[in-house]
Image (tube, helix red, strand yellow):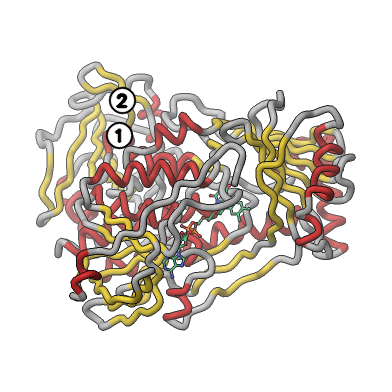
Amino acid sequence: MLKTYSFPQFDYVPSAEQRAGTVVRHPVVVVGAGPIGLTTAIDFAARGIPVVVLDDNNTVSVGSRAVCYAKRPLEIWDRLGCAAPMIDKGIVWNLGKVFRDRELVYQFDLLPEEDHKIPAFINLQQYYLEEIIIDHARTYGGKVDLRWKHRVTGLTDQGDHVVLTVDTPDGPFTLEADWVIACDGANSGLRALLHRDFKGRAFQDRFLIADVVMKADFPTERWFWFNPPFHRNQSVLLHKQAADVWRIDFQLGWDADPEEEKKPERVIPRLKAMLGEDTDFELEWVSVYQFACRRMEAFRHGRVFFAGDSAHQVSPFGARGANTGVQDVDNLSWKLKLVMDGLAPERLLDTYDEERVFAADDNLLNSTRSTDFITPKSAVSRAFRDAVLDLARDHTFARPLVNSGRLSRPTPYGTSSLNTPDEDAFAGAMTPGTNAADAPITRDGAPGWLLGELGDGFVALVADTDPGVAAIDVDGIPCRVVVVGRDIADAKGRLAERYDLKPGTTYLFRPDQYVAARWRAFDETRLRAAVNRAVAR
Ligand SMILES: Cc1cc2nc3c(=O)[nH]c(=O)nc-3n(C[C@H](O)[C@H](O)[C@H](O)COP(=O)(O)OP(=O)(O)OC[C@H]3O[C@@H](n4cnc5c(N)ncnc54)[C@H](O)[C@@H]3O)c2cc1C
């Protein structure tokens, strides 16, 4: 039991099909109601697809796990209508500081630019986040069928559907699905049922997580120490979370005994050394973890898709676990919807694998580099790390080399087969395969945001030239045409700045708000070809 949080207990309810003993085929079954399974459920429901979610537990994430949620997943949750309560409940932060001993060696501002709706990061305990998504799932009028205490124990892909065996308190039953999304976490049973494994590295180090309740006047920033006076030769990370809970991670080394280190008589002296003898705090949660950077070789296996920790696992430095898992879902949901509606060929689903494996490798690379910097495993790595920290004190060029965890950012799908390569010249970052940067706009004089305009379908954004159409039907796939100067106004000039807009410039955005193509002039033929390419037709 935590001091600041009581875990909800969700009822196990046997379904009608289970009671009747009939086997029912569902369009989509999601296995696992962690942050990724829950996000999958609401994204599919938002697209009109009914989803059954099976979870072997009957509560939200227990203990202290994800804390930091990045701008892009928050934008996705905003599209789905549940980011506001997360941001309200969470702690908004942009600034990170890195100390060596007592000295500040480096600081970074994750969102130095103004005029974004969503902050760079929030901190929020994973259990609050999951509860917010579960509450939101209830607003889909039965489209999300959450079934607690349902453990999937068997899976057979029959080619045109999947058969799942599910264990419940009333015994096992069978159900079928057209498509299965495996969001059953790092120890995925579905991965094992398909005889697949992770490839990658497990790191030989241990970290103590201590969540403490205290009223403290540290600023709401991420603070990271190398070799602080209160924890010599190791690192420490401090984050503020909701409800006056502070998360402190102490690096312990591989030799530490996890059971011993969790005891209050070991934890409290460490905390007092850091916070001062006179600081009042109470222990909320203590655990010891080790971590790995690894992934499955492929994320699509026939009719089964792996998303989140079941597909890839990263170390917590950089907060890339849940953040990247949410982006898996964002990538998959629109593609599967188009395939289910018969509007795109099944090979579009292979691009989930193409794009998200690419993103996973980027996350794994960043996460591995951070981990190597924080926990150097050889004399050479340690010498490099210490030299960087020495130099960073006096030389700005060395500061970006200080790696206390490069925080999660979306990976551009620069080489994706769905992109239409540029033929015209553009300045700036919005190349095909990049997620859309937000910008303030107005519509009918009312303030809004570009991402709100993009929504969850194809959109052609045209600058200051009216092509005379509001939408184009590309063989059944609608593409809305939004004209700057006709439908929306570039309220502060940020759109023009961020997208290098000139009269006639046209961007095509995919339903996950990624740039698919762009040109210097509107041309319906080229637009149609780019939509077809973006759906693998
Ligand atoms: C110390 C620590 C700090 C972290 N910090 C961050 C952070 O700051 N930011 C971040 O983005 N990420 C962070 N992470 C990672 C984050 O916690 C995970 O990436 C995230 O929980 C993955 O979500 P998931 O839904 O894929 O899996 P999980 O959260 O593991 O959920 C899996 C669900 O599947 C259920 N399940 C399992 N097997 C079955 C089965 N056979 N049948 C039915 N149900 C099943 C489980 O009960 C569970 O509910 C951190 C992790 C740790 C350990």
Residue 504, percent from left and from top: 24, 34
Could you tell me which residue is drawn at 63 percent across and 47 percent down?
A: 406
Could you tell me which residue is drawn at 32 percent across and 32 percent down?
A: 450
Q: Is mark 2 within 8 Å of ligand 1?
A: no
Please, which residue is most extreme toward the top here? 445
Position of the C terminus by quadrant: bottom left
Q: Does any portion of residue 406 appear in the rendered image?
A: yes
Query: Dot 2: few (<14), some (14–19), or many (≥20) neighbours within 10 Å?
Result: some
Q: Is mark 1 within 8 Å of ligand 1?
A: no
Cβ atoms under marks 2 and 1 closer than 8 Å: yes
Along the viewing direction, whichever of 506 and 325 lies nearer the viewer: 325
The vertical placement of 270 against 463, above or below, is below
How far apart are the two marked residues, 2 and 1, measured between alpha carbons?
7 Å
Query: Dot 1: few (<14), some (14–19), or many (≥20) neighbours within 10 Å?
Result: some
Quarter of the rendering containing residue 372: bottom right
Disc 1 marks a residue whose amino acid type is: Gly
Q: Which mark is residue 448?
A: 2
Residue 311, percent from left and from top: 48, 67
Residue 467, percent from left and from top: 14, 35
Give SS at disc 1: helix
Location of mark 1 (residue)? 452
Disc 2 marks a residue whose amino acid type is: Gly
